[in-house]
């Protein structure tokens, strides 16, 4: 126990000593917490920590969407593994069965309090996956931990509290250590843009795009280890053949992007401007990443449903797995097909001065992501996440997304949806309106995301 307290910091030591200082009689304690599984508790521990993950993604430098998606997935994997003994023995250990990580069992005939296990697991895992978080977010981690610890330590014996803390921290450490074995992904926030990557030459192939002509983002991310999906889940139809003939699909769909951009510049009150800005999660620290947007949407759904702890843990696990594997598949196809961005095509063939509309909250200039265009990142994440959410809760949703409510830098007024599939389609559509993807990019992303969602939905989590 001394080793555990030393390892996980002074705040935990202070809190633990404070717990021992509380004078209670044995009758004051809940003496059978081991019999209370996760379904008996509200979902606030999982919900609050996943909200912290969204803030970390927004403010921590270098956490582009594939990196953020992977971090969320491994943090929620740690939470799942820590909670398996507290979920009525229904679930298999993915770490043990799929990744060959030895997960210790709780001590036989000893009490554990599962909200406390989970609270420490989240704290330790998040601190490991976000070591460079700004001081404000580091403070938020400590505040969240202490608040939940205080709430759930009442009526629990100090011995059970300490045993629960130790177990949660141990599982978090084991999952993090496993994650570091993928050298391509480990600490990737330190090397987001790769100046050594040389894009393949050829007509229509992606090259660094205006305005900043930044080097490629994570060009080898398609080789990162997946969690569930396999190579066949990443096969998609492919983009249309490059052509500048006005009758070709590539010309027509890119011409639509050009014309639509010009129209929306002249008509700022058109609803498509709202849609474009509403879904444009591309500017840290202005917003979180496109992958984390779906984690935030999952949080809203769980809060509306007043989900218990088991439902919350399982929902975050499946959605984050879908997002992480979707990112790998998306990046694999991006650098397989190397399709140039619409702005490059338009400037070469239609309008040498054309710009995207992608600048929400920015005072000057515009922006184009430093990755190939096909498939659309937004569409891929959206189809993967909504495919899982529809499987969990049904496609009919009547859901209002408040992710950007109250923002003044761009139009983030809440939008209401009646089907999860509608959300995916609108997220993809937004990219053609803002000017960074053509419709064939969106179609490829929706196909890919749906296939990843199916892989997650078909995967056996239960015994």
Image (cartoon, helix red, strand yellow):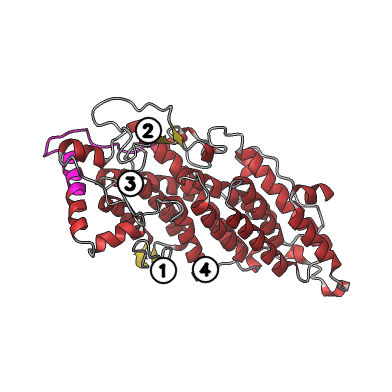
Viewed as shown, does residue 299 lie left or right of 84?
A: left
Residue pictured at 24% horizontal, 32% vertical: 204
What label sits on residue 406 in the rendered view? 1
Disc 4 on helix, strand or loop? helix
Q: Are marks 1 and 2 in contact (CB under 8 Å)?
A: no
Q: Nearer the viewer, mark 4 or mark 2?
A: 2
Residue 110: x %, y % from top left:
81, 58
Residue 48: x %, y % from top left:
58, 63
Looking at the image, tell me whether mark 4 or mark 1 is earlier in sequence order.
Answer: 4
Q: Gap in Å between the C-alphas at discs 1 and 2?
A: 37 Å
Looking at the image, tell me whether mark 3 or mark 4 is earlier in sequence order.
Answer: 4
Q: Residues within 10 Å of mark 2 (few under 14, many from 20)?
A: many
Q: Gap in Å between the C-alphas at discs 4 and 2?
A: 38 Å
Residue 88: in sight, yes or no? Answer: no
Looking at the image, tell me whether mark 1 or mark 2 is earlier in sequence order.
Answer: 2
> Does residue 253 show up magenta in the picture?
yes
Q: Nearer the viewer, mark 1 or mark 2?
A: 1
Q: Nearer the viewer, residue 183 or 316?
A: 183
Q: Which residue in the protein does label 4 denote? A: 303
> Does residue 334 show up magenta in the picture?
no
What label sits on residue 367 in the rendered view? 3
Residue sitting at the far front? 364
Q: Residues within 10 Å of mark 1 (few under 14, many from 20)?
A: few
Looking at the image, tell me whether mark 4 or mark 2 is earlier in sequence order.
Answer: 4
Viewed as shown, does residue 191 lie left or right of 269?
A: right
Q: Residues within 10 Å of mark 3 (few under 14, many from 20)?
A: many
Q: Nearer the viewer, mark 4 or mark 1?
A: 1
Q: Which residue in the protein does label 2 denote? A: 335
Looking at the rendering, the stretch of residues picked out in magenta corresponds to 235-258
């Amino acid at each position: 126990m001394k080793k555990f307290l030393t390892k996980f910091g002074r705040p935990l030591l202070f809190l633990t000593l404070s717990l021992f200082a509380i004078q209670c009689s044995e009758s004051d304690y809940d003496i059978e917490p081991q019999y209370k599984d996760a379904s008996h508790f509200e979902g606030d521990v999982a919900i609050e920590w996943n909200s912290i993950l969204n803030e970390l993604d927004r403010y921590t430098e270098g956490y582009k969407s594939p990196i953020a998606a992977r971090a969320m997935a491994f943090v929620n994997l740690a939470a799942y593994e820590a909670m398996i003994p507290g979920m009525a023995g229904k679930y298999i250990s993915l770490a043990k069965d799929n990744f060959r990580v030895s997960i210790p069992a709780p001590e036989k005939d000893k009490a554990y309090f599962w909200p406390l296990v989970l609270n420490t697991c989240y704290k330790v895992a998040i601190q490991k996956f976000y070591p460079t978080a700004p001081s404000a977010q580091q403070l938020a981690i400590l505040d969240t931990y202490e608040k939940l610890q205080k709430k759930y330590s009442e009526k629990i014996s100090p011995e059970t509290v300490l045993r629960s803390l130790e177990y949660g921290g141990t599982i978090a450490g084991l999952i993090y250590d496993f994650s570091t074995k993928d050298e391509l992904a480990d600490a990737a926030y330190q090397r987001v843009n790769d100046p050594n990557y040389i894009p393949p030459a050829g007509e229509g192939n992606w090259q660094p795009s205006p305005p900043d002509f930044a080097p490629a983002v994570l060009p080898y991310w398609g080789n990162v280890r997946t969690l569930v999906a396999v190579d066949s889940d990443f096969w998609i139809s492919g983009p249309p053949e490059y052509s500048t003939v006005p009758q070709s699909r590539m010309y027509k769909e890119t011409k639509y992007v050009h014309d639509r951009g010009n129209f929306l510049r002249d008509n700022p009150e058109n609803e498509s401007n709202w849609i474009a800005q509403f879904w444009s999660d591309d500017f840290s620290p202005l917003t979180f990443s496109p992958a984390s947007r779906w984690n935030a949407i999952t949080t809203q759904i769980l809060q509306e449903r007043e989900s218990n702890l088991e439902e919350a843990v399982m929902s975050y696990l499946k959605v984050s797995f879908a997002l992480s594997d979707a990112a790998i598949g998306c990046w694999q196809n991006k650098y397989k097909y190397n399709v140039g961005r619409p702005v490059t095509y338009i400037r070469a063939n239609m309008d040498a001065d054309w710009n995207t509309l992608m600048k929400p909250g920015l005072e000057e200039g515009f922006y184009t992501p430093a990755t190939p265009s096909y498939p659309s990142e937004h569409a891929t994440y959206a189809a993967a996440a909504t495919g899982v959410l529809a499987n969990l809760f049904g496609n009919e949703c009547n859901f209002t997304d408040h992710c950007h409510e109250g923002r003044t830098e761009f139009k983030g007024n809440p939008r209401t949806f009646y089907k999860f599939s509608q959300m995916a389609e609108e997220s993809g559509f937004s990219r053609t309106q803002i000017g960074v993807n053509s419709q064939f990019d969106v179609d490829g992303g929706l196909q890919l995301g749906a296939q990843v969602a199916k892989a997650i939905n078909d995967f056996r989590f239960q015994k």
